[in-house]
Amino acid sequence: MVRRSNSRSWKLPLVVVAILGCALASAPPAYAIPGVGGLAKKAKEKAAKAAGVKDEAAGEQVKGDTNVEFNDEVLELTGDRIDRVIQTFQSAVDASAGRSELVDKLNKTSEERSSLWEKDGEKVMEIRQKRDEVEGCYHEGYQEAQERATQEYTQKAMGSDPALLQKFTRIAQEYNAASAKGDSAAMKAAHAELISFAVASKEDSIAVRKKCGPLPPPLPAEGKLDALDKQMESLSNQIRKIDEKVSEAQAKQGGMDRKQFGMAAERIQMYVAWRQMKSYSRSATRGFTNEEIEAMEKRLEKLIALFG
């Protein structure tokens, strides 16, 4: 990609350069393709020496570059192809509207979260670890109580409650049939019905909570961190949707494959960068045919608006 020679920043949003850059990146730089004659390198060298080259008014008549060679990747910059590049980039600019503001918000939110974590992160990790330990204790205690209740009901069904035994038998048969069919939903339903007969008592729950202790209450910083995380996720999703729109705009370019489009866009940007130099001289222009120069000059205002 050609770098600008002055200190002015690109007018294209960074997302356009990034997304459309996938097309440019897929094509090698101009000077790496046989037959182009080192377009990018020569253009920079000629531009740097432009001040010392005589122009047409001084008597040296130079009409474009007659040594430019075109191939399957380097296509002639006809008016139609230039218009396609302009339309594609304009569509991408429209599609990316609002992205820079969202990126700024995301960066600020990320910085706010980092500052908060730096300040209270250690306390948050400690309280979360403690909460995990208590919840683990609850889970283990409730599971033990559930197993005891199940064992009690099983012993009751096998001993003194024929009706309960009949229910257990039916559920077991349904579970086995579902298992043979590989019906996980039916297996889950049968299991849920089975354990519904053996629910831990209220007294069991009180005992478990007494043993494990209460859950540590959330810290104020935790709520702020969660809110910032949700905000960052929302902003990231909005940016992603815009990027998808930019990709769709690129996909509609038509007429050229990715490498061809990338090369065409690179050559146009190179010409615009050179064209805006104070030392620019038409007679010193190399790497473009006279017809290409004329086509770009007719659209120069639009090209500068996009790439200048």
Image (spheres, grey):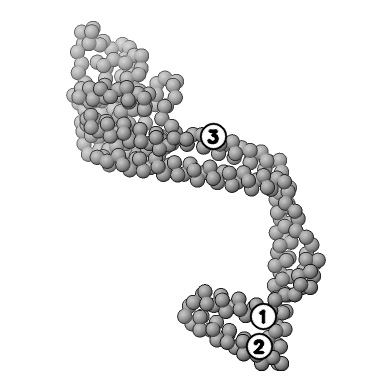
Q: Nearer the viewer, residue 56 or 179?
A: 179
225 sits to left or right of 251? right
For the residue labelled by badge 2, is the local secondary structure a helix, a strand or a loop? Answer: helix
Q: Please state which amino acid type lies under the numbered disc 1.
A: Phe
Residue at 59 percent of width and 40 percent of height: 110
Q: Earlier in the sequence, mark 2 or mark 3?
A: 3
Q: Which residue is disc 2 drawn over?
A: 164
Q: Position of residue 228 (x, y in %)?
A: 62, 44
Q: Determine the CA span between mark 2 and mark 3.
A: 65 Å
Q: Quadrant of residue 77?
A: top left
Q: Which residue is mark 3?
A: 104
Q: Is residue 275 visible?
A: yes
- Type of amino acid at the residue the image marks with label 2: Leu
276 and 161: which is toward the camera: 161
Please tell me which residue lies in front, 67 or 140.
140
Query: What is the distance, in whole Å, between disc 2 and disc 1 at their CAs?
Result: 9 Å
Q: Is residue 128 left or right of residue 232?
A: right
| Disc 1 packing (10 Å; few <14; some 14–19; many ≥20) | some
Q: Secondary structure at mark 3?
A: helix
Q: Quadrant of the N terminus?
A: top left
Determine contact: label 2, label 1, CB under 8 Å: yes
